[in-house]
Amino acid sequence: MNKIIGYFLLCIGLALIFFSMMSMFKVFVDRQPPAQLLTAGKMTLNTQNGPVEIDTSVMVGVFNLTMHALLMFFIVAVGGRVIAAGTNLVKADTFAKALKNANFNDIKKL
């Protein structure tokens, strides 16, 4: 049973990593926009020479791109942890079977 769960966790972890890498690829080649956490607008500054309008779309775009990359990095890290848990379950099951089939002299060698 541990082996089945372990392989299932391996598949889930690989799917998480694949999803996040494909999402990052699509965003960075401009096929899909990143998640819009902030929206762009014009900011007006009052100076001595009068009001000056500043377009903040570039700063907002960089912020959204950075936040998307951090979120995808987090998902890759979670996928790595899930893969590690699955690998440990598969190894533990294999180790338990080896102990069950081994005799006392084989255990001394471990």
Image: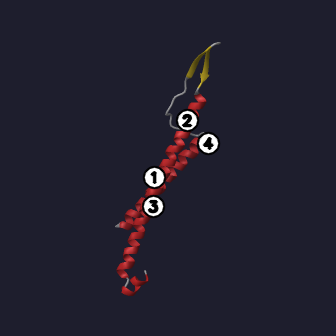
Q: Residue visible at 58% across and 28% down?
A: 57
Q: Residues within 10 Å of mark 2 (few under 14, many from 20)?
A: some
Q: Which residue is mark 1?
A: 78
Q: What is the C-alpha distance between the residues marked 2 and 4?
A: 17 Å
Residue pointed to by mark 3: 84
N-terminal-most mark, 2 or 1: 2
Describe the element under mark 4 as helix, strand or loop.
loop
Q: Is residue 64 above or below residue 71?
A: above
Give the residue pinned by disc 4.
Answer: 29
Considering only order in the chain, which callout, 4 or 2, is on the residue closer to the N terminus?
Answer: 4
Q: Quadrant of residue 8?
A: bottom left
Residue 21 at what x, y percent from top left? 54, 49
Say which label, 2 or 3, has the lower sequence index.
Answer: 2
* Of callouts 3 and 4, the N-terminal one: 4
Residue type (three-letter) at the residue carrying disc 3: Ala
Q: In terms of secondary structure, where does tag 3 sit?
A: helix
Give yes or no for contact between labels 2 and 3 (Cβ–Cβ under 8 Å).
no
Q: Are marks 3 and 4 in contact (CB under 8 Å)?
A: no
- Quick check: 39 above or below 91? above
- Mark 3 → mark 4, Cα distance in angstroms: 31 Å
The x and y percentages for residue 110 are 43, 80
Q: CA distance from mark 2 to mark 1?
A: 23 Å
Task: For label 1, count other residues whose C-alpha is less than 10 Å away and answer few (under 14), some (14-19) or many (20+).
Answer: some
N-terminal of the two: label 3 or label 1?
A: 1
Dot in front, 1 or 4: 1
Amino acid type assigned to the residue bearing label 2 in the image = Phe
How packed is label 4: few (under 14 Cα within 10 Å), some, or many (20 or more)? few
